[in-house]
């Protein structure tokens, strides 16, 4: 029997890879009476070295790898996936050849789901949220669940075995992964929930490609995905994601209704934001910036327009492979855009910048403060400053951020650059609170300052609309309706 130690294979995602050879690539995931191998690798002679006492070896393998291998010896029994049943699973000592799972996760996902499928437990009116306790929206979703009569539990998944055990004890009626947290890149956790017939939803509050590119197969497209920016919907559907739903951000009123004006936050206009997002250099490491694209983007900004994700697709295709390169360009252009707007405003109004002392590199003679706590301090800034300036991220061209909702609930007043995401609000109000270029800001503020009652009327009306339609209780209710969970 010849050894094939440098066997090349084309993976599920079209990449050329070499199949790993040796004991290090195998892991026993379940004890039992006889060996069952999920994947075999390039050399079948390794099996007796892994299980020396066995006389026969049961094997499942992907068609792509099988087509590259020599015929099996008589002591190796090839199983079709449809022959894998619960009796076999219960009795077998199961070994996993990891490269086969990594290169063909969609093939192995239902098989591993069947292996880790928990025993039946009673469905509870409980939602599992796969998120960190300090993540934004964790508290908001918890309160929303309570208002809708559900108990929310923050869940950390440590291993497939532990997940199987947990699901045998309790069975949530819904699992929500926030930004892909808790889901492994090869889809094993997803497969377990699917095998147990537990609804699993992916709620993405970032550029969806930044999250989805961590998954190494097409299996993730099976999930219902809720995104905050509908700009990405056609791109996701073109990539095979058929269950894409637009779900804007919202607010949790209880965090923002008790506000207090504070002298240190007094200003005509306040802007809250970082220079760059955390770990920016690490995330975009190795990306090459094209001078021509940056030049054209800055030229576009200088003309009074935005060089956001919608614009950059003229130069770089919006595909998973190009996600980080697009993001690296957008991050530089986004900073340039904000600097231009803020410099302009500082010449006409008393401007205060909050969120990042790095702004001192770009501005002098402007009040700059470091980050403040979202839940205890932001609301006081919102209610104290005469106007809160919002500049929409280039990474999410049609999106609304938390300020589009929280400012109004805090009895503040938001001025924002226009995005089509604003269309969830009445058009006559959008025209008064949004601007297409920096010079329009002067006209908007002039109108509002001349007509004091108009400003107050807008505040009152926006707060009423948000309380009626745009809280996180409304958002969670929408997810439950889509998934038909009562």
Image (tube, rainbow, N blue to C red):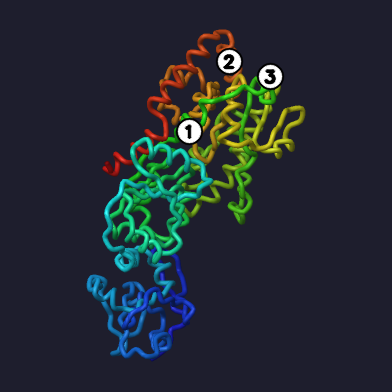
- Residue at the image point whose x is 38% and y is 38% from the top: 146
What is the number of the mark on residue 443? 2
Q: Label 2's element? A: helix
| Mark 2 and mark 3: Cα distance apart in space | 12 Å
Quick check: 343 above or below 83?
above
From the viewer's perspective, is 441 left or right of 57?
Answer: right
From the viewer's perspective, is 446 left or right of 91?
Answer: right
Q: Label 3's element? A: loop
Q: Residue 168 or 435: which is nearer the viewer?
A: 168
- Residue at the image point whose x is 57% and y is 36% from the top: 374
Residue named by callout 1: 400
Instruction: Indicate the position of residue 360 as horizontal and vertical percent values.
Output: 74, 36
Pointer 2 with pointer 1, Cβ within 8 A = no
Residue named by callout 3: 348
Q: Label 1's element? A: loop
Where residue 370 sits, quadrant-wise, is top right
Q: Residue 280 or 255: which is nearer the viewer?
A: 255
How busy is the neighbourhood of tag 2: few (under 14 within 10 Å), some, or many (20 plus)? few
- Residue at the image point whose x is 41% and y is 45% from the top: 203
Q: In the rendered structure, which disc, 2 or 3, sits on the residue that comes first in sequence?
A: 3
Pointer 2 with pointer 3, Cβ within 8 A = no
Q: In the rendered structure, which disc, 1 or 3, sits on the residue that comes first in sequence?
A: 3
Q: Residue 129 or 212: which is nearer the viewer?
A: 129
Quarter occupied by the C terminus: top left
Q: In the rendered structure, which disc, 2 or 1, sits on the residue that comes first in sequence?
A: 1
Quick check: 196 above or below 210?
below
Where residue 354 sits, quadrant-wise, is top right
Instruction: Indicate the position of residue 226 as horizontal and vertical percent values.
Output: 39, 43
Quarter occupied by the N terminus: bottom left
């Amino acid at each position: 029997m010849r050894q094939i130690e440098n066997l090349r294979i084309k993976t599920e995602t079209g990449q050329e890879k070499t199949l790993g050879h040796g004991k290090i690539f195998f892991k026993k995931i379940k004890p039992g009476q006889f060996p069952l191998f999920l994947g075999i690798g390039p050399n079948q002679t390794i099996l007796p070295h892994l299980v020396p006492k066995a006389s026969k070896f049961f094997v499942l393998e992907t068609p792509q790898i099988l087509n590259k291998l020599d015929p099996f010896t008589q002591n190796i029994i090839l199983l079709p996936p449809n022959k894998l049943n619960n009796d076999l699973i219960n009795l077998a000592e199961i070994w996993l050849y990891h490269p086969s799972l990594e290169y063909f996760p969609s093939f192995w996902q239902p098989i591993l789901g069947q292996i880790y499928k928990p025993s039946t437990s009673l469905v509870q009116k409980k939602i599992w949220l796969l998120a960190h306790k300090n993540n934004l929206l964790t508290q908001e979703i918890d309160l929303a669940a309570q208002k809708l009569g559900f108990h929310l539990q923050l869940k950390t998944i440590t291993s497939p075995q532990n997940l199987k055990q947990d699901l045998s004890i309790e069975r949530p009626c819904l699992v929500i992964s926030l930004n892909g947290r808790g889901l492994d890149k090869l889809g094993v956790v997803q497969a377990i929930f699917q095998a147990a017939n537990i609804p699993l939803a992916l709620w993405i509050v970032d550029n969806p490609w930044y999250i989805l590119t961590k998954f190494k197969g097409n299996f993730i497209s099976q999930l219902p995905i809720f995104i905050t920016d509908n700009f990405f919907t056609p791109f996701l559907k073109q990539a095979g994601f058929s269950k894409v739903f637009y779900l804007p951000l919202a607010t949790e009123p209880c965090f923002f209704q008790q506000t207090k004006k504070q002298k240190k936050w007094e200003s005509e206009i306040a802007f809250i934001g970082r220079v760059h997002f955390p770990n920016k250099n690490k995330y975009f490491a190795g990306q090459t910036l094209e001078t021509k694209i940056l030049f054209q983007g800055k030229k576009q900004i200088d003309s009074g327009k935005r060089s956001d994700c919608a614009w950059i697709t003229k130069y770089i295709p919006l595909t998973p492979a190009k996600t980080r390169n697009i993001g690296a360009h957008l991050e530089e252009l986004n900073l340039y855009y904000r600097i231009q707007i803020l410099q302009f405003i500082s010449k006409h109004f008393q401007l205060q910048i909050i969120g990042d002392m790095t702004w001192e590199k770009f501005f002098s003679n402007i009040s700059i403060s470091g980050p403040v706590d979202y839940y205890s301090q932001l609301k006081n800034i919102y209610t104290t400053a005469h106007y809160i300036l919002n500049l929409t991220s280039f990474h999410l061209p049609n999106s609304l951020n938390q300020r589009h909702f929280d400012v109004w609930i805090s009895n503040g007043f938001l001025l924002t650059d226009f995005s089509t995401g604003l269309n969830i609000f009445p058009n006559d109000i959008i025209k008064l609170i949004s601007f297409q270029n920096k010079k329009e800001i002067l006209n908007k503020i002039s109108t509002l300052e001349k007509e004091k009652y108009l400003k107050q009327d807008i505040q009152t009306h926006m707060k009423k609309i948000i309380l009626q339609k745009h809280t996180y209780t409304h958002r969670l209710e929408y997810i439950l309706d889509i998934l038909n969970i009562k």
